Amino acid sequence: MAGRTARSCGIERYLHWRPEKGRWWFRRRVSGDLVAIIGKAEWRQTPAARSRPEAEREAMRLLDETNWTIDLALAGNWPPVGGLSSATSSSLFCGRNGQNPYTSAVRRSSARTTVDSLVYSII
């Protein structure tokens, strides 16, 4: 069964340079047994950062969010009912317009939320 990926495995697995766009790209595949639960085959997002160190920091946050989603899916708690902050859920689960399908909240780019605070907000 699928499991979470440790941060120490190397973020470069998920962070790719797109020379045609001049941007970094976060991409993580969803395990086959979780695709039906999570509802997508992969996570893809373009970090706002232009430099590699900044993009790696953003990618680590995205890796934490995807690990959190995997943990919830494995525990049978996906999709979550309430408790997601609009900033985190929008950044990971929405299209470019910022509409969150779970809370219908508009993404605020200045908001930063950690996985720990998300877990506590659900409990």
Image (cartoon, grey):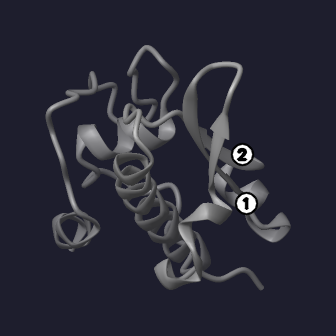
Q: Residue at x 37, y 50 (%)?
A: 58
Locate residue 114, reporting x and y percent.
22, 62
Of helix, strand and loop, which one carries label 1?
Answer: loop
Q: Splitting the image into 4 quarters, where does residue 20 fall?
A: top right
Q: Residue at x 27, y 21 (%)?
A: 106
Q: Residues within 10 Å of mark 1 (few under 14, many from 20)?
A: some
Disc 2 and disc 1 in contact, CB within 8 angstroms: yes
Which quadrant holds the N terminus? bottom right
Q: Splitting the image into 4 quarters, where does residue 28 fall?
A: bottom right
In this rendered view, identify the residue nearer to me: 12 or 80.
12
Locate residue 17, reporting x and y percent.
64, 40
**123 horizontally vs 17: left or right:** left
Q: Amino acid at mark 2?
A: Lys
Which quadrant holds the C terminus? bottom left
Q: Residue at x 37, y 43 (%)?
A: 89
**On residue 100, which mark appears?**
none
Q: Residue at x 24, y 66 (%)?
A: 122
Q: Residues within 10 Å of mark 2 (few under 14, many from 20)?
A: some
Q: Amino acid at mark 1?
A: Val
Locate residue 105, reporting x and y percent.
27, 26
Q: Splitting the image into 4 quarters, where does residue 90 fall?
A: top left
Locate residue 69, reporting x and y percent.
50, 64
Give the residue pinned by disc 2. 40
Identity of the residue furthest to the top in this view: 97
Vertical comparison of 4 with 54: above or below: below
**85 horizontally vs 69: left or right:** left
How far apart marks 2 and 1 lie (CA) works out to 7 Å
Give the residue pinned by disc 1. 30
Report the number of numbered marks: 2
Work out whether mark 2 precedes mark 1 in sequence or the reverse, and give the earlier one: 1
Vertical comparison of 82 with 20: above or below: below
